[in-house]
Structures are given as structure tokens and as C-alpha cells.
Image: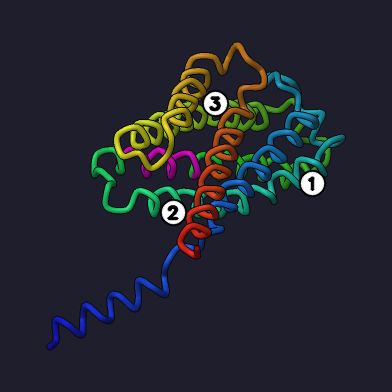
Amino acid sequence: MARDATKRAHSLTRDHLRTPKAAAIAGMIFSILLLAVFLLLRISVPADPREPGGWLIGGSNSVAVAVNLVPFAGIAFLWFIGVLRDRLGRLEDRFFATVFLGSGLLFLGMLFTAAALVGGLLMASATEPGQMIDTWAYHFARSAIYNIVNIYMTKMTGVFMITTSTMAIYTGFAPRWLAILGYALALLVLFGSYQIAWSFVVFPLWVFITSTYILIDNISHSSDVAT
């Protein structure tokens, strides 16, 4: 009797915690926000990490908007990871699940770290306007941000895409064409990020395409069940 009651309670809890069909929209929101962050930073901050820092005076407002958008993008990305794991369900392999979840969380942690460093530069510059330009502290922070974003964070997005694409091929939770696209874009990010200036848009675009497919598939599946 106690075991049956436990099963019924678990079933009721599962029904209440069922992932919404429209949860894949979180991936789209993440993509739009991250693209907005990257574009605002690209417009306001010179690409050369050795520049003296004149953007702290002229483009600080746009950069501040970008920094404040990052936490919302991070929340949406966590939802996106949850959507993928829910779609995998019991087919999730422990090895690939560990690499998949680990690379996603590392990407998110480095995104927040880079945003915090940029925010620190803005706050320091606001405290003493003009004093941060072309200083040792500025160049150190600027170099750290550049390395985090262009080396470590970018490579983690490649690992995330490769792992997700591999799970899609072996479990079938996503079509094969989407997995092949993920492999191609991951290789582009891993080996071409230094040569291709617009490679920063690859990951959010891939997340947007994946989320769009999942959302359409969820809606069509719900329509089939209803009929």
C-alpha cells in the first residue's frame, strides 16, 4: 500500500512538473539576447584588445546595456539546457550527459565572468572618469576578457554543440541534418574563430535553429495527440 501511494504521489508530481510545450522559446530568447549583447559590444568596443580604452567614455552606455542583458540570457540558456535534457529523457547517456551539462555550465560561468569584468571596468571608470584609460589595470582586465571570450568560452560552445549533435545521432531526439549542422558549426567555432570575425554569431544561431525545431515538433506532436 505504501509503495502504491508513493508511486501515485510521484506520478502526480511528474504531471505537475511536466515541461511546457513552449519551453523551447527559452532557447530563442537566449539567442536573441546573446546576439544583442555581442552586437552592442562589437559596436562600442574595438576588436583590438590592445586599444587604450577610449570606449569607456564614448560607448559606456551601450556596454552597460549589454552587461545588464547577460543575466537574462544566462537564465534562458539554463531553460534551454533543461529542454534538451527533458527531450532526451531516459535515453540520456551518463558520459555524454556529463560533457553536455559540464560544457554548458562552463560556458555560462565564463560568460558571467567576462560580463562581471566588463562591469568592473565601467564602475571603475565611472568612479574616476578618464583615469582608467591606458593603465595597467585596464589592459590586464581587457586582455582577460578577450581570452575568456575568444578562447575558453568559444571552445566550450564547440564542445557543447558536438556533444549535443552526437546525442542527437545516437538517440534520435533531433533529426540527423540538425546534428550534421551542429558538427559543421562546431568545427567552424573551434578552428576558425580567429580567422572569421563573425564567428561569435554561430552559437546563438545554432541554438535558435535547434529551439525552433523543438518548438515546431512539440506543437505538431500536441496537435496529433489532440486529434
Question: Three-letter amino acid code at disc 3?
Answer: Asn
Report the front residue among 45 and 225.
225
Vertical order, 112 against 151 (above or below): below
Q: Residues within 10 Å of mark 1 (few under 14, many from 20)?
A: some
Q: Which residue is mark 2?
A: 82
Depth check, mark 1 against mark 2: the one in front is 2
Q: Is residue 30 magenta?
A: no
Q: Residue 197 location in percent, x, y?
A: 66, 18
Residue furthest bottom as drawn = 1
Say what secondary structure mark 3 lies in. Answer: helix
Tag 3 residue = 147
**Amino acid at circle 2:** Gly
- Image quadrant containing the N terminus: bottom left
Boundaries of the magenta span: 99-108
Give the mark, 1 or 2, whose residue is nearer the N terminus.
2
Question: CA gap, disc 1 to disc 2?
Answer: 38 Å
Q: Amino acid at mark 1?
A: Ala
